[in-house]
Image (cartoon, rainbow, N blue to C red):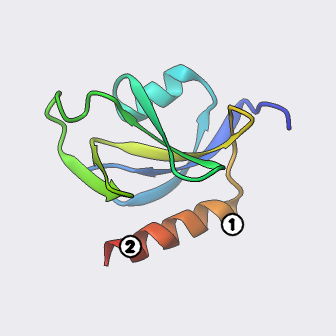
Amino acid sequence: MKARKRIRVVTKTVEGGWAIRMIPNTLEALQAAVHGHIECVQLTTELTLVCNEEGLIRGMPFNERIFNFNIYGDFLIAKVWRDEFTTLSMEEASAVIRILEKKER
């Protein structure tokens, strides 16, 4: 699978809800999405959560708790293949949102 210039990710901002977005597949775009240095947390063999590694100590508001991991500030969920970010299909992105919204209830 070839690295893509833009990737589809699932995002969740503190102010808003879940969204599916296309972003450039660059470190700078990932940092912009989480407003700082990134931390990657592997959720499954193919899904990685990307958040701000200093969210708590920078006083960012609590956003979500996923798999016993508290997330402060905005975050995204991306697909990873062979240590590279790659795009989620629309079906995969929609499934991620459905599963995580169900978890919130």
Q: Is label 2 in contact with label 1 (beta carbons under 8 Å)?
A: no
Against 82, residue 8 (above or below) is below
Against 99, residue 77 (above or below) is above
Q: Position of residue 8 (x, y in %)?
A: 63, 47
Q: Nearer the viewer, mark 2 or mark 1?
A: 2
Using a 10 Å C-alpha cutoff, classify the residue at mark 1 as few (fewer than 14 neighbours), some (14 to 19) or many (20 or more).
Answer: few
Q: Image check: 11 left or right of 90? A: left
Q: Which residue is farthest left? A: 59
Q: Position of residue 65 (x, y in %)?
A: 30, 57
- Is residue 49 visible to the viewer in this orientation of the structure? yes
Q: Residue at x 49, y 71 (%)?
A: 99
Instruction: Indicate which disc, 2 or 1, sits on the residue closer to the N terminus.
Output: 1
Residue behind mark 2: 103
| Mark-to-mark CA distance, 2 and 1 | 18 Å
The kind of residue on which mark 2 rests is: Lys
Q: Which residue is farthest right? A: 1
Q: Residue at x 59, y 67 (%)?
A: 94
- Is residue 15 visible to the viewer in this orientation of the structure? no
Residue behind mark 1: 91
Q: Position of residue 79 (x, y in %)?
A: 64, 46
Give the position of the C terminus as an image quadrant: bottom left
Q: Residue at x 69, y 45 (%)?
A: 87
Q: Image check: 100 left or right of 15? A: right
Secondary element at tag 2: helix
Q: Image check: 55 left or right of 89? A: left
* The one of 91 and 21 positioned closer to us in this rendering: 91
Give the position of the N terminus as an image quadrant: top right
